[in-house]
Image (cartoon, rainbow, N blue to C red):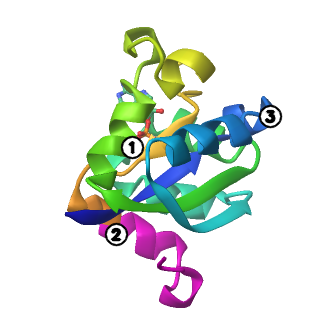
Amino acid sequence: ATERTLSIIKPDAVAKNAIGDIIARIEKAGLKVVAAKMVHLSEEKAGGFYAEHKERPFFKDLVGFMTSGPVVVQVLEGEGAIAKNRDLMGATNPKEAAPGTIRADFAETIDANAVHGSDSPESAEREINYFFGNDEICPR
Ligand code: CMP
């Protein structure tokens, strides 16, 4: 089915000038960008986004990293968009990411891992609504 998923190009990948390379991979895989913006997240906005990880030992570092520079937030649309985007990204830990995936090619550490992608239809819906109003999404 046609799905939507939330993608974040994280501060490490933005700092590396890899925005275009990453979006090219997304588009070549057949996904469409239907919303996009660049933002420098506040601690509150980043912490709210990752609220499910609040009790995890890496939460503080994660929020610190995600607020360390601007990110590019996008809504991607397409057939099986959630799984397709996760295949493109590779494993969360870049050391375990398959060759040719975004994290294998652009990421350094589990925190600075280049991209985020929603992991289920429920989280996709929550994450998209967390960043975008309906009038900011352009179906096509
Ligand atoms: P992301 O997909 O954005 O979701 C949560 C993030 O926490 C994850 O990518 C990693 O960048 C970061 N993180 C840091 N340590 C861990 C860990 N041990 N397990 C999972 N995620 C971690």
Which of discs 1 and 2 lies nearer the camera? The answer is 1
Q: Residues within 10 Å of mark 2 (few under 14, many from 20)?
A: some
- The x and y percentages for residue 1 are 19, 63
Residue shown at the point (57%, 44%) measured from the top left = 63
- The x and y percentages for residue 107 are 58, 21
Q: Which residue is mark 3?
A: 17
Q: Which residues are magenta?
A: 125-140
Q: What amino acid is at disc 2? A: Arg
**Residue 110 seen by the camera:** no
Residue shown at the point (50%, 16%) measured from the top left = 104
Question: Quick check: 30 left or right of 1?
Answer: right
The verdict on residue 135 being magenta is yes
**Disc 1 element:** helix
* The residue carrying mark 1 has its beta carbon less than 8 Å from ligand 1: no
Question: Quick check: 98 left or right of 64?
Answer: left
**Disc 2 element:** helix
**Disc 3 element:** loop
Alpha carbon distance from label 2 to label 3: 28 Å
* The residue carrying mark 2 has its beta carbon less than 8 Å from ligand 1: no
- The x and y percentages for residue 84 are 33, 43
Q: Which residue is mark 1?
A: 85
Question: Quick check: 58 left or right of 8?
Answer: left
Question: Quick check: 53 left or right of 47?
Answer: left
Main structural element of the magenta stretch: helix, strand or loop? helix
Q: Which residue is mark 2?
A: 126
Which of discs 2 and 3 lies nearer the camera? The answer is 3
